[in-house]
Image: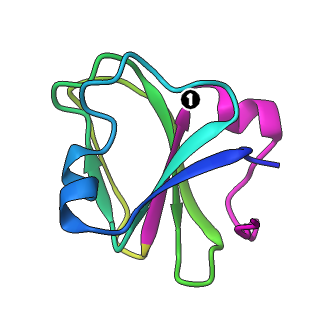
Amino acid sequence: MLCEKVMVCDSAWESTVGLLGREGLEDGTGMLISNCRMIHMFFMRFPIDVVFVDSGFEVVKIVRNLKPWRVAFCPVASSVIELKAGSVDMTGLETGMKLELRD
């Protein structure tokens, strides 16, 4: 399991705000941003792991420990999952794996 609780951002406003203003992400929590190929870490206070997925939720790129004031981009992605830094390594996630959302 990649994360137990996923916050879904599917509006332009939710995607713009994202994790801004937060102190961090709790263990087992992530944020899914739909229709997204690039994220920025401007004004962020903590690093995150970033998982880019295609329309079939296959992992197409992983960026570990993305620090504040950096940018990550993947032209073939359709969505992004933001996780607490270190989550990718703890779960063993790799490019090519297929993810699914469950209730």
Quadrant of the image occupied by residue 58: bottom right
Residue 91 inside the magenta-drawn segment = yes
Residue positioned 67% across, 59% down in the render: 95
Colour option used = rainbow
Q: Position of residue 79 (x, y in %)?
A: 44, 68
Span shown in magenta: 79-103
The amino acid marked with disc number 1 is Lys
Q: Position of residue 51 (x, y in %)?
A: 54, 52
Considering only vertical position in the picture, is 72 above or below 32?
above
Q: Position of residue 92 (x, y in %)?
A: 81, 42
Residue positioned 67% across, 26% down in the render: 27
Q: Please tell me how crowded label 1 is: few (under 14), some (14-19), or many (20+) other residues with Cα within 10 Å.
A: many
The residue closer to the viewer here, 34 or 90, is 34
Residue 64 is left or right of residue 58, and the answer is left
Residue beneath disc 1 = 84
Considering only vertical position in the picture, is 62 above or below 43?
below
Residue positioned 62% across, 83% down in the render: 56
Quadrant of the image occupied by residue 97: bottom right
Residue 64 is left or right of residue 45, and the answer is right
Residue 17 is left or right of residue 24, and the answer is left
Q: Position of residue 35 (x, y in %)?
A: 34, 74
**Count of marks, rendered view:** 1
Q: Judging from the image, what secondary structure is the residue with disc 1 in?
A: strand
